Amino acid sequence: MNLNLLRSRAFAFLIDALLFLSVMFVLIRIFNFFAPGSDVREDAMQLYTQKDFIVFTWTMITGAVLMVSYMTWSYTTRGGQTIGHKVARIRIQRRGGGKIGIGGVLRVIAVGILRFVLIVVPGPMIALAGGEVIASVFALIWGLVLIMPIPVQSKPRPVSLWEILGGYEFKSL
């Protein structure tokens, strides 16, 4: 993989992640204010209260809808570029070249949702099942490792599993 392209992708990811996390923090505050229930834990070892799960669920649902909307808008109206991609001067395209169509956008979104779920769902589900804190943290770390663009194919150029599943590649501008 071209080192400059990899740097550009990392920079674009950082910008988009900061935008997304900013929105998520605002959503958490809003849902925490309006969600019924108490922040008092029933058990000293309890990771989450019922209110925490309500806030988590609504934040993740809203976050997923916003992510789908943002990706659809970015890839269909902005020439295959999110705000981060625009700043980093890269764009997404079909593997092998060409503009990504609506079917390709839906495929990229499905892969994005899968990656989102791998990060945010396992930890709280382990906590809900009564698992240990370390298991939830390990699930988060494992999810972060899984979503990284680690090359699984090296010919003709290094390609990650996510690019293969999504049918896309990045191009420097």
Image (cartoon, helix red, strand yellow):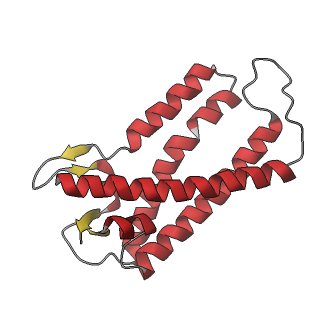
Whether residue 1 appears in this view of the structure is: no
Residue 104 image-quadrant placement: bottom left
**Residue lying farthest to the right in this orientation:** 37
Residue 36 in the image: x percent, y percent? Answer: 89, 46
Residue 15 in the image: x percent, y percent? Answer: 45, 58
Residue 5 in the image: x percent, y percent? Answer: 23, 58
Q: Is residue 12 above or below residue 42?
A: below
Q: Residue at x 41, y 71 (%)?
A: 105
Residue 7 in the image: x percent, y percent? Answer: 27, 53
Whether residue 172 appears in this view of the structure is: yes
Residue 87 image-quadrant placement: bottom left
Residue 91 vs residue 151: left or right?
Answer: right
Residue 107 vs residue 34: left or right?
Answer: left
Q: Residue at x 33, y 64 (%)?
A: 88
**Residue lying farthest to the front in this orientation:** 87
Q: Is residue 47 above or below residue 2?
A: above
Residue 83 vs residue 160: left or right?
Answer: right
Q: Residue at x 24, y 72 (%)?
A: 173
**Residue lying farthest to the bottom in this orientation:** 77
Residue 105 vs residue 29: left or right?
Answer: left
